[in-house]
Every structure is written in structure tokens, then in C-alpha cells.
Amino acid sequence: MGFSDLIIRYRTFTSQLGVSLMQLGATLSSTDNANGIQLAKFNSDDVLPMNFAPPIGPELVSPEELPAAWAYKRFRDLEEKESYRSTLLAELTKAFEILSPQDAATATAGLQDLLGQMAEQGAVVLADIVESDAFLELVARYDEIMAQEGSGSFIHRFVDLRGTVGLLTDPEVNNPMVHPLMITLISYAVGGPIRMVDARAKDAEPLSVLAQDNMLHIDNTPFNDEYKIIVTWRRGTAKGPAGQNFTFLPGTHQLARTCFVNEAGEPWSSENASIFTTTERIRRVFDAQMQLRDPDRPVVIEVSDSERPLSTVFAAGSLVHHRFRTASGNARSCIIMAFHRVADNPGRLVSDVEDTPSASLSELLTSGVPDESYQQRFITTLCAAAGQIAELLAKWKSTPERPVPLPLQERQIDGRRFEEWISASTEAPPVQEIRNREQPIPYGEVLSSEEFFDLVWRLMRFDKHGPLDLILYHDNREEPRKWARNLIREMSADRLRERLSGWSADLGHHRPADCLRPLQVHALVSEVLRTLPLDGNQTPPADWDNDMLGMSPAAAARSVRQLLEDIAEAVLRCEDMPAYLSTSLFAFWIVDSAYSLDGRRNLVVQDCTRRLLRDYVMLALTAMPDAPVA
């Protein structure tokens, strides 16, 4: 759609909307009260009747059935990838020759076995990478970071580790996260040198919730080839996870999420096409899995161990997996790192750290520059760790009673536990239901300005975790938005209050006329994109110093710009009112982010931000039924 068409539709919608809302406002406006703000009860269907977009759901197919297989990086450059695998394996085998013949043979055979497991299952689970005392050092560092920087929400505590990259690069504690054996498995699987593109820490308390982070899903985009390492342990201990466990469906990585193709012939997808939230969708996944494997029964693996912390390497961008959240069990801590082939994604996790010729493997992974020398540097650095790789593989043979790679068949869930897993995947309460229960709106009461501000702040803490269906492009240009998205979704309660306080004068009395239709939100966000350069030459305000850790101004500007573009697109595709509410909240916060990065100077953007805030507040205070599980 051209901009002129957009303006015509925008004027038509606003003209129609103005009449209906003026009529509605005559009877439903909030009551002016000398003592404060009286909360009038508005129903969402009355305030903003809408025709929502048809829902988008996932479909797994064989590679041969894809409508645009050329757009999937997994299925491109196959000869180049195979050549790299041969080179990597040959170089590592040669490096093993410094060992005794027996140790070299053990290491070579063990590595080949794990590579085969990875290809067949889509995941490898490792234990005993370090001893308990060494792991406790990691736990102490992790807990300190989480206590200082963790963004507590009702779902989890979260830290973006690009701001504390030293945890990832410190050889005293980083082996469970980036052991050279795990890096070798990923590099071989994707067929090239890799780099870390995301790293986060999460604490998960016992909780039953159907939120995007906890749904049965596939990560990232169908067009990328993403692998992850997740380190899991019982919070505060050097024991294995025993609650809130990672689960996956082995073999499903051999399938692919199908995509859509627009009128211009461009493939695309969306995040909702990667989540499995109904029994019917899960049944179809099981059917597809059983065609590949055992035709008699589906297989779900639960990654747990009563004694040992676990490091799981898995094909996150193709393997169906799940964070099995329940209201029972122990609290779990984890560190999650995402990796892409350098040729597929030239970005760096940390953009404000200089790459040096003497960089260690972990430093290459987090801040290495993708020049012509990177592949050789990467292989050389891996081979320098051949002794470390061989040592871990030798543990496998020397301690069969405590296997280093866990036999996955022993972690298969069935019976009652399988039924609990199905229930957690499909019947857990969505965010809207928990919000309605935990933060009821006191309709009819009169609130002071401070109490009204506090109510909006509390509602935002739930709504930023609501459904958000962002587009996925075939060229992966959405990748930079991760930082900006996490900046909003994982904002701590204190930071949320601090940033919202800058707009407290604009909250005031809520009224139906504040509501915006999707095209109006789209137009406001588009206006911000046209108005602000967002080229990285601006100086963020001083109160953003902590937000900017690990990010250069240019990288932050790219991330904010991309999320602005994608929110403008997503708001036109919302499939229900809870999704529209969350998307509208993200529209406010990402425009506020752009306004802040620009130094809070532009009056046009200030007005757009104010209007988006008032839109969210009115939507948040309308009475909505609990969202049905789609």
C-alpha cells in the first residue's frame, strides 16, 4: 500500500471513528471529580468494535513441500557447508593427534557419536562439564548479576547478558556455557563458523501461564538456522533442574515451518506461525514426528537431573521445544545463548567491544568481527582447545554410571507426566486471565492522580507480556529488533515506573475518544519513522546509560527503528483484543524509546507518544473477557 492510499484510509477511519466515539463519549466518559479520577467501566466491544485479522498458526512440512525453500538458510550453500564440515573435522582429528593414540581414538569416536546424535535427535544434553565447586562459582556470579540487574516480572526474572558479557568470556566460569565441544557441535551442524547473537539469564519460579516465552514453540524465524545452548540448574545450587524443565520433541528439526508468499513473491512468516497452543496443533506435530520416527507413539524428552546441572545444545530454529512451567516443582535458573552461522548473520552480540588478534574462543563468539580471517581464526581457536574437548569426551567413557551426554530415552515422559505436559501446553491460563485475577480494576472508585498512575503502571507490568505477533522476513532484517523488544518486555518494575513518570502529566481522565484504530496507530508510528533520523548520531539521555550497556548508539538506533517498522505492520494484523492491547502498549514504548534516543526534543514525536499512551490507557481500562486460547 502506498502512503497516499494509507492517508485516504486513515482519514476515512478517523472521520467515522470521530462520530461514533463522540456519541459514545456523551454517555460513557469518565466522571470528572474534584477529588480525583473516577473509574467508569467501559466494555471493549462498545469502546472499539473491531474486525480482527484471521489467526495465523503453525504448520510443519518436509523441505520438499515448502513454497519457497530457497529462502531457508538451512537449505542453501549446501556444498560450501559440507566442505566446511570436512575441514573442521579433519583439523580437529589432526589436533587430537597430540594425545596418546588411545585418547585420540576415544575423542574422535566420541565426537562422531555426538555429531550423529545431533543430526538425528536435534539436541544433545551434557552433564558434568565442570565439578560442583566450579559450577557454584558460576551460580554465585549469576545470582549477583540477577540480584543487581534482574527485571522481576510475574513470569520470570531476566537479564540481557550483553551488558555483563564478562560472565560469558571469563574462563573461570564459562565452560558450562561455551565449552569448545558444544561450540564444535553447533558449528558442524550449521556448516560454518558461528557467533553468539543473543544471551540472556532467566529465573523461573513455579507458575502456570500460557505466555509466549512458555508456549510449545520453535524459536526465531523459519528462514534462519539458529542453534542454542541452554544451561539449567536448580536455583541457588549446583544441582540439576527439578522443575520448570526444558522439554523437546526429538527429530522434529528435520521438518520445517512453512511460510507465506505475498503478491510480490516475497516469502514471510510471523511469530504466531511458530507456536503450538491447542491440542489439535500439538496432535499434528505428533503425527509429523511419528512419520519420521516411531509410528506408534509420540516422544517428548524432559531435560532434568536430580544431581547435575545440564547444558543442552539444540536446533532452536527447527526443533519443537517448550519450557515446561508448572505451579509445582523447584525454581529454575538458566542461561540461554543463541548462535548463527557468521555468513547468515554478520551481527555481533556486543558492538562496543574491540576485537583483538589474541581473542579467546568466547571473545570471538561475543565480539569477533566477521572479516575474511574469521573462519581460520575460529577453527584455529577450536583446535587449540582439542585437549579440553577430548577430556570431556573421555569422561563419557570412564564414567558410564554418570554419562556425560544423557541418554535421551531415559528422559522420555509418559503416563501421568505426559498428560501434565499436554495440559501445561494447552490449558495454562493466558496473561489476560492472570492479569484480570491479580490486578482487578476498581471500577466505580475515585482514585487520586498518584493512585491512577500506580494502577496504569501495574497493568503495564502484565500487558507487556501479552501476545505480540511480529512479522518474520525472508531476509531476516528483523534480527536487530531483539534488543529493543527486550528493552520493553523485560523492563524492570522500577525502570518502568521511572520511564512512565515522564508522562504522568498526560495520563489524566481516560475517555473513549482516546482509543485509536489499528490504522491510526500505524499512521502515528509511521510518522515517527519519517520524523526521526535514528542514525546513531544522537546522544541518549543520561538515564539511559544502563539500558545502553553493550550497545553502541548506532546499534541501538537500528534496533529501535526495526521494531518501529515491525510494530507498525503488526498492529494491522492483531487477531483479538488482548493482542491489540499488547501491541498498542509496545507501540507506545517503542515510540518513547525513539523519542528518548533522539534526546527528547522532537515535538511531533512527543505528541505521537502522548496519543499512543492515552490510547493504551483507555484500552487497558476497558472490561475484556479472559482471552480464549487460540
Image (spheres, rainbow, N blue to C red):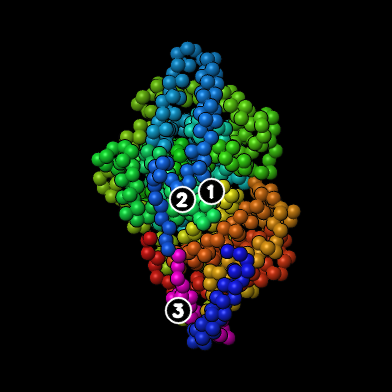
Position of the C terminus by quadrant: bottom left
**Tag 1 residue:** 474
Q: Which mark is residue 259?
A: 2
Residue 602: horizontal and vertical position, in percent?
Answer: 72, 66
Q: Is residue 622 above or below residue 272?
A: below
- Left or right of residue 425: residue 356: right
Secondary structure of the residue carrying tag 1 is loop
**Tag 3 residue:** 46
> Which residue: 39% across, 50% down?
59
Q: Which mark is residue 116?
A: none
For the residues labelled 1 and 3, the Cα–Cα distance comes to: 39 Å
> Which residue: 49% across, 39% down?
74
**Looking at the image, how many numbered discs can be counted on the residues?**
3
Q: Which residues are magenta?
A: 31-53
Q: Are marks 2 and 1 in contact (CB under 8 Å)?
A: yes
188 inside magenta stretch: no
Instruction: Report the amino acid beneath label 1.
Output: His
Residue 16: horizontal and vertical position, in percent?
Answer: 54, 80
Q: Which of the 4 image quarters holds residue 364?
A: top right
Instruction: Report the amino acid beneath label 3.
Output: Asp
Residue farthest top in this picture = 101
Residue 234: horizontal and vertical position, in percent?
Answer: 43, 43
